[in-house]
Image: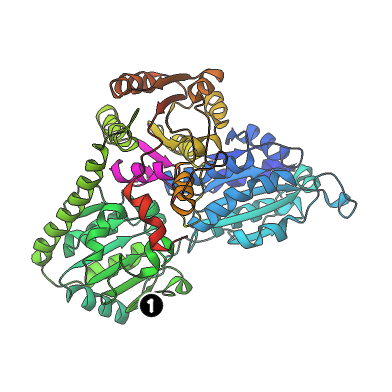
Amino acid sequence: MGKSELGGVLAARALREEGVEAVFALPGGHNLPLFEGARLTGLRLVDSRHEENAVMMAEGYALASGRVGVASVTAGPGLTNALPGIAEAHQAGVPVVVISGRTGLAQRGREAVQDLDQMSIVAPVTKWRDQCLQPERIPAYVRDAVHQAHTGAPGVAYLEIPQDVFGMSAAPLERPWPAGHPDARGTAVAGEVARAVEVLAGASRPVVLAGSGAFFSGAGPALSAFVERTGIPVTTTSAARGLLDDDHPRCLGGLVHGGIALASSDAVLVLGSRFNANLLWGGAPLFPPEGRVVQVDVRPENLGGERRPDVGLVGDVAAVLDSLTGAWTADAGRFDGWADQARGGAAISLESWEAQCERPAEDIHPGWLARECARFAAEAWGDAYTTVSDGGDSVLWGVAFFRARGPGRCLYIGSALGTLGIGLPFGIGARVAREEPVLVFTGDGAFGLSAMELDTAARHRLPIVTVVVNNGGWGDVRHEQRAFYGHEADTGAVLSEMRYDLLAEAVGGHGEVVKSPEELRPALDRAAAFDGPSVVNVHTDPEVMSDLMKNLGGLGVM
Protein backbone atom coordinates (compact mmCIF):
# COMPACT_ATOMS: atom_id res chain seq x y z
CA MET A 1 0.00 0.00 0.00
CA GLY A 2 1.24 3.49 -0.83
CA LYS A 3 1.86 6.25 1.68
CA SER A 4 -0.99 8.24 3.19
CA GLU A 5 -1.53 11.70 1.61
CA LEU A 6 -4.01 14.57 1.78
CA GLY A 7 -7.07 14.09 -0.46
CA GLY A 8 -6.19 17.25 -2.36
CA VAL A 9 -2.74 15.85 -3.13
CA LEU A 10 -4.26 12.60 -4.36
CA ALA A 11 -6.56 14.58 -6.69
CA ALA A 12 -3.78 16.82 -8.05
CA ARG A 13 -1.45 13.90 -8.66
CA ALA A 14 -4.19 11.95 -10.43
CA LEU A 15 -4.84 14.94 -12.70
CA ARG A 16 -1.17 15.15 -13.61
CA GLU A 17 -1.05 11.43 -14.33
CA GLU A 18 -3.99 11.93 -16.71
CA GLY A 19 -2.03 14.54 -18.65
CA VAL A 20 -3.70 17.61 -17.14
CA GLU A 21 -1.27 20.53 -17.00
CA ALA A 22 -3.37 23.33 -15.52
CA VAL A 23 -6.45 23.90 -13.37
CA PHE A 24 -8.55 27.08 -13.45
CA ALA A 25 -10.09 27.70 -10.06
CA LEU A 26 -11.42 30.04 -7.42
CA PRO A 27 -10.62 28.96 -3.87
CA GLY A 28 -12.93 28.43 -0.92
CA GLY A 29 -12.82 26.36 2.21
CA HIS A 30 -14.46 23.39 0.49
CA ASN A 31 -11.94 22.98 -2.36
CA LEU A 32 -8.84 24.41 -0.66
CA PRO A 33 -7.20 20.97 -0.33
CA LEU A 34 -6.81 20.89 -4.13
CA PHE A 35 -4.85 24.16 -4.00
CA GLU A 36 -2.45 22.56 -1.52
CA GLY A 37 -2.26 19.50 -3.73
CA ALA A 38 -1.41 21.65 -6.76
CA ARG A 39 1.39 23.35 -4.79
CA LEU A 40 2.91 20.07 -3.68
CA THR A 41 2.67 18.29 -7.04
CA GLY A 42 3.59 21.17 -9.35
CA LEU A 43 0.19 21.27 -11.03
CA ARG A 44 -0.29 24.72 -12.57
CA LEU A 45 -3.16 26.57 -10.91
CA VAL A 46 -4.67 29.70 -12.46
CA ASP A 47 -6.95 31.38 -9.94
CA SER A 48 -9.77 33.49 -11.40
CA ARG A 49 -11.98 36.27 -10.05
CA HIS A 50 -15.32 34.53 -10.73
CA GLU A 51 -16.31 30.88 -10.90
CA GLU A 52 -18.18 31.19 -14.21
CA ASN A 53 -15.01 32.52 -15.78
CA ALA A 54 -12.90 29.75 -14.26
CA VAL A 55 -15.02 27.18 -16.08
CA MET A 56 -14.94 29.20 -19.31
CA MET A 57 -11.14 29.42 -19.02
CA ALA A 58 -11.09 25.63 -18.84
CA GLU A 59 -13.36 25.54 -21.90
CA GLY A 60 -11.08 27.95 -23.76
CA TYR A 61 -8.09 25.78 -22.85
CA ALA A 62 -9.87 22.73 -24.29
CA LEU A 63 -10.90 24.58 -27.44
CA ALA A 64 -7.35 25.77 -28.02
CA SER A 65 -5.60 22.48 -27.25
CA GLY A 66 -8.10 19.72 -27.95
CA ARG A 67 -7.34 18.37 -24.47
CA VAL A 68 -9.48 18.23 -21.33
CA GLY A 69 -9.86 21.52 -19.46
CA VAL A 70 -10.22 21.40 -15.69
CA ALA A 71 -11.86 23.87 -13.30
CA SER A 72 -12.42 23.77 -9.55
CA VAL A 73 -14.92 25.73 -7.44
CA THR A 74 -16.05 25.77 -3.86
CA ALA A 75 -19.46 24.72 -2.54
CA GLY A 76 -22.83 26.50 -2.60
CA PRO A 77 -22.57 29.89 -4.28
CA GLY A 78 -19.24 28.85 -5.77
CA LEU A 79 -21.00 26.10 -7.66
CA THR A 80 -24.05 28.20 -8.58
CA ASN A 81 -21.74 30.96 -9.87
CA ALA A 82 -20.09 28.34 -12.09
CA LEU A 83 -23.36 27.12 -13.62
CA PRO A 84 -23.39 29.47 -16.67
CA GLY A 85 -19.90 28.29 -17.60
CA ILE A 86 -20.88 24.65 -17.08
CA ALA A 87 -23.99 25.11 -19.23
CA GLU A 88 -21.99 26.75 -22.02
CA ALA A 89 -19.35 23.99 -22.13
CA HIS A 90 -22.07 21.33 -21.95
CA GLN A 91 -24.05 22.86 -24.82
CA ALA A 92 -20.90 23.25 -26.91
CA GLY A 93 -19.83 19.65 -26.27
CA VAL A 94 -16.43 20.60 -24.86
CA PRO A 95 -14.45 18.20 -22.62
CA VAL A 96 -14.32 19.97 -19.25
CA VAL A 97 -13.94 18.50 -15.76
CA VAL A 98 -15.38 20.53 -12.90
CA ILE A 99 -14.18 19.48 -9.42
CA SER A 100 -16.36 21.03 -6.75
CA GLY A 101 -16.16 21.02 -3.01
CA ARG A 102 -19.25 20.23 -0.96
CA THR A 103 -20.37 20.50 2.65
CA GLY A 104 -18.62 17.89 4.78
CA LEU A 105 -20.46 14.65 5.47
CA ALA A 106 -20.53 15.44 9.19
CA GLN A 107 -22.41 18.70 8.49
CA ARG A 108 -25.06 17.38 6.10
CA GLY A 109 -28.69 18.01 6.98
CA ARG A 110 -27.88 20.74 9.50
CA GLU A 111 -28.27 23.80 7.24
CA ALA A 112 -24.52 24.35 7.29
CA VAL A 113 -23.08 27.41 5.56
CA GLN A 114 -23.01 26.96 1.75
CA ASP A 115 -24.76 23.58 1.87
CA LEU A 116 -26.76 22.76 -1.26
CA ASP A 117 -27.92 19.72 -3.24
CA GLN A 118 -25.36 20.33 -5.96
CA MET A 119 -25.70 16.97 -7.71
CA SER A 120 -29.32 17.71 -8.56
CA ILE A 121 -28.50 21.23 -9.74
CA VAL A 122 -25.83 20.16 -12.24
CA ALA A 123 -27.75 17.18 -13.62
CA PRO A 124 -29.29 18.98 -16.65
CA VAL A 125 -26.01 20.58 -17.76
CA THR A 126 -23.46 17.78 -17.38
CA LYS A 127 -22.63 14.66 -19.33
CA TRP A 128 -21.53 12.78 -16.22
CA ARG A 129 -21.70 13.51 -12.50
CA ASP A 130 -20.64 11.65 -9.36
CA GLN A 131 -19.42 12.20 -5.81
CA CYS A 132 -16.46 10.65 -4.04
CA LEU A 133 -17.11 9.82 -0.38
CA GLN A 134 -13.86 8.00 0.46
CA PRO A 135 -10.47 9.73 0.26
CA GLU A 136 -8.63 6.60 -0.87
CA ARG A 137 -10.86 6.46 -3.96
CA ILE A 138 -10.19 10.06 -5.07
CA PRO A 139 -7.62 9.06 -7.76
CA ALA A 140 -10.03 6.58 -9.33
CA TYR A 141 -12.83 9.15 -9.43
CA VAL A 142 -10.53 11.77 -10.97
CA ARG A 143 -9.41 9.32 -13.65
CA ASP A 144 -13.03 8.49 -14.41
CA ALA A 145 -14.03 12.16 -14.65
CA VAL A 146 -11.28 12.91 -17.18
CA HIS A 147 -12.20 9.79 -19.15
CA GLN A 148 -15.88 10.66 -19.21
CA ALA A 149 -15.21 14.24 -20.30
CA HIS A 150 -13.27 13.39 -23.46
CA THR A 151 -14.36 9.90 -24.47
CA GLY A 152 -17.11 9.48 -27.04
CA ALA A 153 -19.06 12.70 -27.45
CA PRO A 154 -17.16 15.20 -25.25
CA GLY A 155 -18.91 17.08 -22.48
CA VAL A 156 -18.78 18.26 -18.89
CA ALA A 157 -17.88 15.78 -16.16
CA TYR A 158 -18.73 16.96 -12.65
CA LEU A 159 -16.92 15.48 -9.65
CA GLU A 160 -18.01 16.44 -6.15
CA ILE A 161 -15.82 15.85 -3.09
CA PRO A 162 -17.09 16.77 0.41
CA GLN A 163 -14.83 19.04 2.42
CA ASP A 164 -13.96 16.51 5.09
CA VAL A 165 -13.20 13.81 2.50
CA PHE A 166 -11.04 16.24 0.52
CA GLY A 167 -9.14 17.16 3.66
CA MET A 168 -8.57 13.61 4.97
CA SER A 169 -5.34 11.73 4.44
CA ALA A 170 -5.38 8.25 2.95
CA ALA A 171 -3.37 5.85 0.87
CA PRO A 172 -4.82 5.31 -2.61
CA LEU A 173 -6.32 1.92 -3.34
CA GLU A 174 -3.95 -0.43 -5.10
CA ARG A 175 -4.75 -3.60 -7.02
CA PRO A 176 -2.52 -6.23 -8.67
CA TRP A 177 -3.94 -5.30 -12.10
CA PRO A 178 -3.69 -2.00 -14.02
CA ALA A 179 -6.36 0.66 -13.62
CA GLY A 180 -7.52 3.24 -16.12
CA HIS A 181 -9.16 3.38 -19.54
CA PRO A 182 -7.89 2.39 -23.01
CA ASP A 183 -7.88 4.91 -25.86
CA ALA A 184 -10.43 3.15 -28.09
CA ARG A 185 -12.13 4.55 -31.19
CA GLY A 186 -15.14 3.16 -33.00
CA THR A 187 -15.78 3.35 -36.73
CA ALA A 188 -18.75 2.73 -39.01
CA VAL A 189 -19.51 -0.64 -40.55
CA ALA A 190 -18.18 -1.27 -44.05
CA GLY A 191 -21.58 -1.44 -45.73
CA GLU A 192 -22.61 1.99 -44.47
CA VAL A 193 -19.24 3.43 -45.47
CA ALA A 194 -19.79 2.14 -49.01
CA ARG A 195 -23.25 3.75 -49.10
CA ALA A 196 -21.77 7.08 -47.97
CA VAL A 197 -19.06 6.94 -50.64
CA GLU A 198 -21.71 6.20 -53.26
CA VAL A 199 -23.71 9.28 -52.24
CA LEU A 200 -20.72 11.62 -52.21
CA ALA A 201 -18.96 10.29 -55.30
CA GLY A 202 -22.21 10.37 -57.25
CA ALA A 203 -22.82 14.03 -56.49
CA SER A 204 -21.90 16.98 -58.68
CA ARG A 205 -21.48 19.59 -55.93
CA PRO A 206 -20.53 17.86 -52.65
CA VAL A 207 -19.36 19.78 -49.58
CA VAL A 208 -17.83 18.69 -46.28
CA LEU A 209 -19.11 20.49 -43.18
CA ALA A 210 -16.85 19.82 -40.19
CA GLY A 211 -18.08 20.60 -36.67
CA SER A 212 -16.68 20.45 -33.15
CA GLY A 213 -16.83 16.64 -33.05
CA ALA A 214 -14.22 16.62 -35.80
CA PHE A 215 -11.93 18.87 -33.76
CA PHE A 216 -12.14 16.88 -30.54
CA SER A 217 -11.62 13.70 -32.53
CA GLY A 218 -8.27 15.15 -33.63
CA ALA A 219 -9.44 14.67 -37.20
CA GLY A 220 -7.22 17.30 -38.84
CA PRO A 221 -4.81 14.86 -40.53
CA ALA A 222 -7.64 12.50 -41.50
CA LEU A 223 -9.65 15.40 -42.95
CA SER A 224 -6.65 16.59 -44.98
CA ALA A 225 -6.09 13.08 -46.33
CA PHE A 226 -9.77 12.75 -47.24
CA VAL A 227 -9.80 16.09 -49.05
CA GLU A 228 -6.62 15.28 -50.96
CA ARG A 229 -8.07 11.94 -52.02
CA THR A 230 -11.56 13.16 -52.97
CA GLY A 231 -11.12 16.82 -53.92
CA ILE A 232 -14.31 17.80 -52.04
CA PRO A 233 -14.27 21.38 -50.65
CA VAL A 234 -14.62 21.90 -46.89
CA THR A 235 -16.30 24.48 -44.67
CA THR A 236 -16.02 24.46 -40.89
CA THR A 237 -18.03 25.61 -37.92
CA SER A 238 -17.55 25.99 -34.16
CA ALA A 239 -14.40 24.33 -32.81
CA ALA A 240 -13.49 22.86 -36.21
CA ARG A 241 -12.23 26.22 -37.53
CA GLY A 242 -8.67 25.68 -38.72
CA LEU A 243 -8.78 21.88 -38.98
CA LEU A 244 -8.07 22.62 -42.61
CA ASP A 245 -5.83 25.66 -43.11
CA ASP A 246 -7.75 28.59 -44.58
CA ASP A 247 -5.07 28.75 -47.30
CA HIS A 248 -5.71 25.15 -48.40
CA PRO A 249 -7.09 25.17 -51.98
CA ARG A 250 -10.12 23.12 -50.89
CA CYS A 251 -10.91 25.16 -47.76
CA LEU A 252 -13.91 27.51 -47.91
CA GLY A 253 -13.24 29.00 -44.48
CA GLY A 254 -15.92 29.29 -41.84
CA LEU A 255 -19.59 28.72 -42.42
CA VAL A 256 -20.25 32.46 -42.70
CA HIS A 257 -18.44 32.29 -46.08
CA GLY A 258 -18.64 28.59 -46.94
CA GLY A 259 -22.40 28.66 -46.45
CA ILE A 260 -22.81 29.91 -50.02
CA ALA A 261 -21.36 26.65 -51.37
CA LEU A 262 -23.38 24.65 -48.86
CA ALA A 263 -26.58 26.29 -50.10
CA SER A 264 -25.65 25.31 -53.68
CA SER A 265 -24.59 21.75 -52.89
CA ASP A 266 -26.30 18.52 -53.83
CA ALA A 267 -24.60 16.40 -51.13
CA VAL A 268 -23.11 17.26 -47.73
CA LEU A 269 -20.86 15.23 -45.44
CA VAL A 270 -21.57 16.50 -41.91
CA LEU A 271 -18.78 15.63 -39.48
CA GLY A 272 -19.44 15.81 -35.74
CA SER A 273 -22.21 18.39 -35.72
CA ARG A 274 -25.87 18.17 -34.78
CA PHE A 275 -28.70 19.78 -36.71
CA ASN A 276 -29.33 22.61 -34.26
CA ALA A 277 -30.03 26.32 -34.74
CA ASN A 278 -26.43 27.00 -35.79
CA LEU A 279 -27.07 24.80 -38.83
CA LEU A 280 -30.64 26.05 -39.30
CA TRP A 281 -31.78 22.55 -38.32
CA GLY A 282 -30.46 21.16 -41.59
CA GLY A 283 -32.89 23.20 -43.66
CA ALA A 284 -33.05 26.08 -46.11
CA PRO A 285 -31.48 28.43 -46.88
CA LEU A 286 -28.31 26.67 -45.64
CA PHE A 287 -29.15 23.12 -46.73
CA PRO A 288 -31.08 22.54 -49.99
CA PRO A 289 -34.15 20.42 -49.20
CA GLU A 290 -33.47 18.17 -52.21
CA GLY A 291 -29.79 17.63 -51.35
CA ARG A 292 -28.49 14.40 -49.87
CA VAL A 293 -26.83 14.23 -46.45
CA VAL A 294 -24.26 11.90 -44.93
CA GLN A 295 -23.89 12.52 -41.19
CA VAL A 296 -21.10 11.19 -38.96
CA ASP A 297 -21.24 11.27 -35.17
CA VAL A 298 -19.75 9.24 -32.36
CA ARG A 299 -23.18 8.96 -30.70
CA PRO A 300 -26.09 7.47 -32.64
CA GLU A 301 -28.62 9.63 -30.79
CA ASN A 302 -26.98 12.73 -32.31
CA LEU A 303 -27.80 11.59 -35.85
CA GLY A 304 -30.81 13.13 -37.54
CA GLY A 305 -33.62 14.86 -35.72
CA GLU A 306 -34.86 17.90 -37.59
CA ARG A 307 -33.04 16.64 -40.71
CA ARG A 308 -32.78 12.90 -41.23
CA PRO A 309 -29.58 11.97 -43.11
CA ASP A 310 -29.64 9.71 -46.14
CA VAL A 311 -26.74 7.84 -44.55
CA GLY A 312 -25.89 7.96 -40.85
CA LEU A 313 -22.45 6.75 -39.79
CA VAL A 314 -21.78 6.05 -36.12
CA GLY A 315 -18.15 6.35 -35.09
CA ASP A 316 -15.23 8.55 -34.21
CA VAL A 317 -14.90 11.22 -36.92
CA ALA A 318 -11.19 10.62 -37.57
CA ALA A 319 -11.68 6.86 -37.77
CA VAL A 320 -14.68 7.17 -40.10
CA LEU A 321 -12.80 9.59 -42.34
CA ASP A 322 -9.97 7.07 -42.62
CA SER A 323 -12.51 4.45 -43.69
CA LEU A 324 -14.11 6.81 -46.24
CA THR A 325 -10.71 7.70 -47.69
CA GLY A 326 -9.77 4.05 -47.98
CA ALA A 327 -13.03 3.19 -49.74
CA TRP A 328 -12.86 6.07 -52.24
CA THR A 329 -12.10 5.06 -55.84
CA ALA A 330 -13.25 8.08 -57.88
CA ASP A 331 -10.78 10.49 -59.48
CA ALA A 332 -9.73 13.29 -57.10
CA GLY A 333 -9.82 15.81 -59.95
CA ARG A 334 -13.45 15.32 -60.86
CA PHE A 335 -14.56 18.10 -58.48
CA ASP A 336 -11.95 20.67 -59.55
CA GLY A 337 -14.48 22.83 -61.37
CA TRP A 338 -16.95 22.69 -58.51
CA ALA A 339 -14.23 23.46 -55.95
CA ASP A 340 -13.22 26.55 -57.93
CA GLN A 341 -16.85 27.64 -58.03
CA ALA A 342 -17.23 27.05 -54.28
CA ARG A 343 -14.05 29.02 -53.51
CA GLY A 344 -15.38 31.79 -55.72
CA GLY A 345 -18.59 31.87 -53.69
CA ALA A 346 -16.63 32.14 -50.44
CA ALA A 347 -14.59 34.98 -51.97
CA ILE A 348 -17.79 36.78 -52.97
CA SER A 349 -19.04 36.45 -49.39
CA LEU A 350 -15.83 37.96 -48.03
CA GLU A 351 -16.09 40.77 -50.57
CA SER A 352 -19.63 41.53 -49.36
CA TRP A 353 -18.35 41.87 -45.80
CA GLU A 354 -15.49 44.04 -47.08
CA ALA A 355 -18.00 46.25 -48.87
CA GLN A 356 -19.92 46.78 -45.63
CA CYS A 357 -16.71 48.16 -44.09
CA GLU A 358 -16.67 50.97 -46.67
CA ARG A 359 -20.07 52.33 -45.70
CA PRO A 360 -20.09 55.73 -43.95
CA ALA A 361 -19.62 55.62 -40.19
CA GLU A 362 -19.11 57.98 -37.31
CA ASP A 363 -15.99 57.27 -35.25
CA ILE A 364 -14.82 53.83 -36.48
CA HIS A 365 -16.75 51.20 -38.41
CA PRO A 366 -16.78 47.93 -36.36
CA GLY A 367 -16.30 45.83 -39.50
CA TRP A 368 -13.30 47.90 -40.55
CA LEU A 369 -11.95 47.44 -37.04
CA ALA A 370 -12.27 43.64 -37.21
CA ARG A 371 -10.64 43.54 -40.64
CA GLU A 372 -7.71 45.68 -39.53
CA CYS A 373 -7.24 43.62 -36.36
CA ALA A 374 -7.15 40.49 -38.50
CA ARG A 375 -4.55 42.03 -40.79
CA PHE A 376 -2.50 43.20 -37.83
CA ALA A 377 -2.46 39.76 -36.20
CA ALA A 378 -1.39 38.03 -39.41
CA GLU A 379 1.36 40.58 -40.12
CA ALA A 380 2.65 40.83 -36.55
CA TRP A 381 2.49 37.17 -35.51
CA GLY A 382 2.57 35.08 -38.69
CA ASP A 383 0.67 31.81 -38.37
CA ALA A 384 1.12 31.08 -34.66
CA TYR A 385 -1.50 33.13 -32.80
CA THR A 386 -5.04 32.79 -31.48
CA THR A 387 -8.00 35.11 -31.96
CA VAL A 388 -11.14 35.09 -29.81
CA SER A 389 -14.35 36.79 -30.95
CA ASP A 390 -17.05 37.72 -28.44
CA GLY A 391 -20.20 39.80 -28.30
CA GLY A 392 -23.46 40.17 -30.21
CA ASP A 393 -22.70 41.81 -33.55
CA SER A 394 -18.96 42.06 -32.87
CA VAL A 395 -18.60 38.27 -32.87
CA LEU A 396 -19.96 38.15 -36.42
CA TRP A 397 -17.43 40.69 -37.65
CA GLY A 398 -14.67 38.67 -35.99
CA VAL A 399 -15.85 35.38 -37.48
CA ALA A 400 -16.05 37.02 -40.91
CA PHE A 401 -12.51 38.42 -40.94
CA PHE A 402 -10.25 36.41 -38.62
CA ARG A 403 -8.43 33.60 -40.37
CA ALA A 404 -7.59 30.17 -39.01
CA ARG A 405 -4.18 28.79 -39.90
CA GLY A 406 -4.47 25.79 -37.60
CA PRO A 407 -6.85 24.03 -35.21
CA GLY A 408 -7.82 25.78 -31.99
CA ARG A 409 -6.64 29.18 -33.17
CA CYS A 410 -9.91 30.89 -34.04
CA LEU A 411 -12.26 30.74 -31.06
CA TYR A 412 -15.75 32.14 -30.66
CA ILE A 413 -19.13 31.26 -29.19
CA GLY A 414 -19.50 27.75 -30.56
CA SER A 415 -22.77 26.65 -29.01
CA ALA A 416 -26.35 27.51 -29.82
CA LEU A 417 -26.61 28.75 -26.22
CA GLY A 418 -24.99 32.01 -27.36
CA THR A 419 -23.17 32.83 -24.12
CA LEU A 420 -21.51 36.27 -24.04
CA GLY A 421 -18.49 37.19 -21.96
CA ILE A 422 -16.37 34.27 -23.16
CA GLY A 423 -13.74 36.53 -24.75
CA LEU A 424 -11.23 37.16 -21.98
CA PRO A 425 -11.71 33.77 -20.25
CA PHE A 426 -11.22 31.91 -23.57
CA GLY A 427 -8.20 34.10 -24.26
CA ILE A 428 -6.66 33.25 -20.89
CA GLY A 429 -7.33 29.55 -21.44
CA ALA A 430 -5.76 29.69 -24.91
CA ARG A 431 -2.70 31.55 -23.64
CA VAL A 432 -2.17 28.93 -20.91
CA ALA A 433 -2.62 26.12 -23.44
CA ARG A 434 -0.08 27.61 -25.87
CA GLU A 435 2.61 30.20 -25.29
CA GLU A 436 1.45 32.14 -28.34
CA PRO A 437 0.01 35.63 -28.86
CA VAL A 438 -3.73 36.04 -28.22
CA LEU A 439 -6.02 38.77 -29.50
CA VAL A 440 -9.50 39.08 -28.00
CA PHE A 441 -12.05 40.99 -30.08
CA THR A 442 -15.09 41.80 -27.95
CA GLY A 443 -18.07 44.09 -27.67
CA ASP A 444 -18.23 46.48 -24.74
CA GLY A 445 -21.27 44.74 -23.25
CA ALA A 446 -19.71 41.29 -23.46
CA PHE A 447 -16.41 42.56 -22.08
CA GLY A 448 -18.16 43.88 -18.97
CA LEU A 449 -19.27 40.36 -18.06
CA SER A 450 -15.72 39.15 -17.48
CA ALA A 451 -13.51 42.26 -17.42
CA MET A 452 -12.23 41.58 -13.89
CA GLU A 453 -10.28 38.68 -15.34
CA LEU A 454 -7.80 41.30 -16.50
CA ASP A 455 -6.55 40.96 -12.94
CA THR A 456 -6.12 37.21 -13.47
CA ALA A 457 -4.15 37.82 -16.67
CA ALA A 458 -1.97 40.38 -14.87
CA ARG A 459 -1.26 38.19 -11.83
CA HIS A 460 -0.32 35.26 -14.02
CA ARG A 461 1.66 37.40 -16.46
CA LEU A 462 -0.38 36.49 -19.50
CA PRO A 463 0.14 39.04 -22.31
CA ILE A 464 -3.26 39.19 -24.01
CA VAL A 465 -4.37 42.00 -26.32
CA THR A 466 -8.08 42.84 -25.87
CA VAL A 467 -9.75 45.09 -28.43
CA VAL A 468 -13.05 46.48 -27.11
CA VAL A 469 -15.63 47.44 -29.75
CA ASN A 470 -17.07 50.31 -27.74
CA ASN A 471 -20.37 51.48 -29.21
CA GLY A 472 -21.85 52.49 -25.87
CA GLY A 473 -24.51 49.82 -25.74
CA TRP A 474 -25.82 46.33 -26.40
CA GLY A 475 -25.88 46.75 -30.17
CA ASP A 476 -28.01 43.75 -31.10
CA VAL A 477 -30.58 44.61 -28.39
CA ARG A 478 -30.67 48.21 -29.59
CA HIS A 479 -31.36 46.93 -33.10
CA GLU A 480 -34.21 44.71 -31.85
CA GLN A 481 -35.77 47.57 -29.89
CA ARG A 482 -35.82 49.73 -32.98
CA ALA A 483 -37.03 46.92 -35.26
CA PHE A 484 -39.89 45.73 -33.04
CA TYR A 485 -40.91 48.83 -31.13
CA GLY A 486 -39.88 51.68 -33.41
CA HIS A 487 -37.66 53.38 -30.85
CA GLU A 488 -34.69 52.88 -28.56
CA ALA A 489 -35.43 52.79 -24.84
CA ASP A 490 -33.53 55.07 -22.47
CA THR A 491 -32.44 52.06 -20.45
CA GLY A 492 -31.59 48.46 -21.19
CA ALA A 493 -29.57 48.71 -24.39
CA VAL A 494 -27.60 51.85 -23.49
CA LEU A 495 -24.19 51.72 -21.85
CA SER A 496 -21.77 54.51 -20.99
CA GLU A 497 -18.67 55.38 -22.96
CA MET A 498 -16.62 53.78 -20.22
CA ARG A 499 -12.82 54.01 -20.17
CA TYR A 500 -12.20 50.29 -20.47
CA ASP A 501 -8.54 51.02 -21.14
CA LEU A 502 -8.20 52.30 -17.57
CA LEU A 503 -9.24 48.87 -16.27
CA ALA A 504 -6.06 47.48 -17.80
CA GLU A 505 -3.98 50.22 -16.22
CA ALA A 506 -5.62 49.54 -12.84
CA VAL A 507 -4.16 46.01 -12.80
CA GLY A 508 -0.74 47.12 -14.03
CA GLY A 509 -1.51 46.49 -17.69
CA HIS A 510 -1.47 48.72 -20.74
CA GLY A 511 -4.46 50.72 -22.00
CA GLU A 512 -5.17 52.97 -24.99
CA VAL A 513 -8.13 54.85 -26.44
CA VAL A 514 -8.65 54.89 -30.21
CA LYS A 515 -11.08 57.35 -31.78
CA SER A 516 -9.83 57.57 -35.37
CA PRO A 517 -8.63 54.98 -37.91
CA GLU A 518 -5.08 56.27 -38.08
CA GLU A 519 -4.64 55.72 -34.34
CA LEU A 520 -5.40 52.00 -34.47
CA ARG A 521 -2.26 50.35 -35.83
CA PRO A 522 0.19 52.23 -33.55
CA ALA A 523 -2.03 51.40 -30.56
CA LEU A 524 -2.06 47.70 -31.51
CA ASP A 525 1.72 47.73 -31.94
CA ARG A 526 2.21 49.15 -28.46
CA ALA A 527 -0.32 46.77 -26.93
CA ALA A 528 1.32 43.73 -28.53
CA ALA A 529 4.74 44.82 -27.27
CA PHE A 530 3.55 45.06 -23.67
CA ASP A 531 4.48 42.14 -21.40
CA GLY A 532 1.08 41.76 -19.77
CA PRO A 533 -2.61 42.32 -20.47
CA SER A 534 -3.57 45.27 -22.61
CA VAL A 535 -6.86 46.87 -23.63
CA VAL A 536 -7.36 48.93 -26.78
CA ASN A 537 -10.64 50.78 -26.25
CA VAL A 538 -11.99 51.66 -29.71
CA HIS A 539 -14.92 54.04 -30.19
CA THR A 540 -17.19 52.63 -32.91
CA ASP A 541 -20.38 53.82 -34.57
CA PRO A 542 -23.42 52.71 -32.53
CA GLU A 543 -25.62 52.97 -35.64
CA VAL A 544 -23.71 50.32 -37.60
CA MET A 545 -24.95 46.73 -37.62
CA SER A 546 -23.79 43.89 -39.86
CA ASP A 547 -26.22 42.76 -42.54
CA LEU A 548 -26.17 39.24 -41.10
CA MET A 549 -27.23 40.44 -37.63
CA LYS A 550 -30.02 42.49 -39.17
CA ASN A 551 -31.34 39.39 -40.93
CA LEU A 552 -30.97 36.85 -38.12
CA GLY A 553 -34.47 37.49 -36.86
CA GLY A 554 -35.93 36.34 -40.16
CA LEU A 555 -34.15 32.98 -39.90
CA GLY A 556 -36.15 31.99 -36.82
CA VAL A 557 -33.14 30.78 -34.85
CA MET A 558 -34.12 32.47 -31.58
Q: Position of residue 313 (x, y in %)?
A: 36, 74
**Dividing the picture into quarters, in which one does residue 543 lie?**
top left
- Badge 1: how crowded within 10 Å, few (<14), some, or many (20+)? some
- Look at mark 1 in the image and give the residue it sits on: 308
Q: Magenta region: which residues?
A: 385-413
Where 193 sits versus 66, above or below? below
Assess whether residue 542 is covered by the magenta stretch.
Answer: no
Where 15 sits versus 298, above or below? above
Which residue does the image show at 49% across and 59% down from the upper left?
Answer: 154
Q: Residue furthest front?
A: 486
**Dividing the picture into quarters, in which one does residue 541 lie?**
top left
Where 133 sits versus 398, above or below? below
Which residue does the image show at 34% across and 62% down from the upper left?
Answer: 318
Q: Position of residue 519 (x, y in %)?
A: 32, 20
Which residue does the image show at 42% across and 21% down from the upper left?
Answer: 513
Is 11 left, or right, of 339 in this rendering?
A: right
Q: Position of residue 296 (x, y in %)?
A: 36, 69
Is 183 left, or right, of 323 in this rendering?
A: right
Q: Nearer the viewer, residue 267 or 442?
A: 442
For numbered disc 1, what is the local secondary structure? Answer: loop
- From where the camera sits, is residue 404 visible? no
